[in-house]
Amino acid sequence: MKSSRMEQILGKALKRITPAKNELDAEKKISVETVERIRRAEGKHVDVIVCGSLARNTHLRGDRDIDIFVMMPPHITETEFENEGLRIGKLVFRGHKWEKAFSQHPYIRGNIRGFDIEIIPSYKVEKAELLQSAVDRSPFHNAYLLRRLSAKQQGEVRLMKQFLKGIGAYGAELKVGSVPGYVTELLILKYGNFTGAIGAISKWREREAIDLEGYYSEVEALKKFDTPLVVIDPVDRNRNVAAALSLNQYSRIIAASRAFLKKPSGNFFFPKKGKDIEASRVKKLLEKEGLIVVAIGYPKKELADVLWGQIRRLAKKISVALQQKDFKVLRSTEWSDEENEIIFVFDLEANELERVHKRIGPAVTNQLHSEEFLKTHKRPVSGPRIEEGRWVVDIDRKHWKATEYIALLLRQLRKSEKSGIKKALNKKARILGGKEVLHKYRKNAEFRKWFSTYLKGKEEFE
């Protein structure tokens, strides 16, 4: 009975996420036109190919992204490589909207007839081991999957992508710390189909390794790469393509797989839009002692993926510093509109601590350490006294209010941090008052959805 219900759910989902014929025709038409235009253009490029999920027919309905790789001979200089890539990109988008984007090298992306097209320069190398830039692997990924994925498995990949998307665990960006499209394709190759993959994932252990080409033993793979999920790139044995997957997202995928197998539902693929928390309730929650919201600016012209690594490190630094001052951090999170500001939320057990705290010293029997401890604490509020064979004093806390301590930390971090996050800290770094947060909650739909989800503190699929 459950099997039949699951088949119905998967059938409906697949029908909903598979691009319609007219959509596929339009994608093919613009892809062919763009490739031919580049091939006819004079330049140093030696080949042009379409890569990504569109090329492999594993993209979802409505995805209008086209990745076109302009391949250069490996002997040209890096300057020539960049200049040629930018020149050809601008040629493609003549008369259309475009912008310069940055990865390892700058490239041009734009929009033609509603399609988001990226013109990516890469070196044409004979094998992945000889790559000269990170994107050189993509044509090898393309060839590998085109040889192995069956037509039926293309649909199974779509189901896997939509399932992960539905539970909020899809995307290679560091911001989400989830599963990139390439990994979903490898999962289907490994486990055969969507149900096989979900069944296997539901039994994943603390750490898992997938190595389709058998480059390593499981022990070797897990030792080489220190991440929850290790997926060895079939075309590059030295790369773990699941490196961006965080422990939380890894755990979320396992939990959602178990929940789906226990009670199959289309809601896993297309979650019902939950109601945001009423502003009046948010106001009360913001009045809760210990909920602190910090805002800093968003630095211009910084790579989002690089900056998100810095954002996470900054959040961890602040959390660790708070813990070291005895403020108990219950949970914390980060958000950004990736344009104007970055928001941090620290949910503490309490914003204020007792102004006096107890410091436990060494055992009385340890003469050297006892003398040092007593010398350090000459004028305590209370003590020194002996408790359970140890010296004990009560001393004044230097920092007893979390908001004031965070404000101090922000000033200090402006001087010590580097790169993009330093620019961000210098752009109005401050603690937001309840009224400011509430105003933002009412006016900014993206922030409202994120903050409401955080305040609910519940997995969407549960």
Image (cartoon, rainbow, N blue to C red):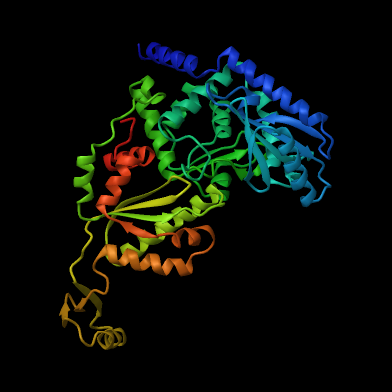
Between 192 and 156, the one lying in front of the other is 156
Report whether 4 appears left or right of 307.
left
Across and down, in percent, residue 265 comes to: 36, 20
Between 6 and 341, the one lying in front of the other is 341
Report whether 94 appears left or right of 459.
right
Q: Quadrant of residue 393?
A: bottom left
Across and down, in percent, residue 8 comes to: 41, 12
Q: Is residue 423 above or below residue 175?
A: below
Residue beneath the point at 33% across and 65% down: 407
Q: Is residue 157 above or below residue 304?
A: above
Between 65 and 12, the one lying in front of the other is 65
Quadrant showing the N terminus: top left
Residue beneath the point at 68% across and 48% down: 105
Across and down, in percent, residue 209 comes to: 53, 39
Between 304 and 283, the one lying in front of the other is 283
Quadrant showing the C terminus: top left
Q: Quadrant of residue 189?
A: top right
Q: Is residue 241 visible?
A: yes
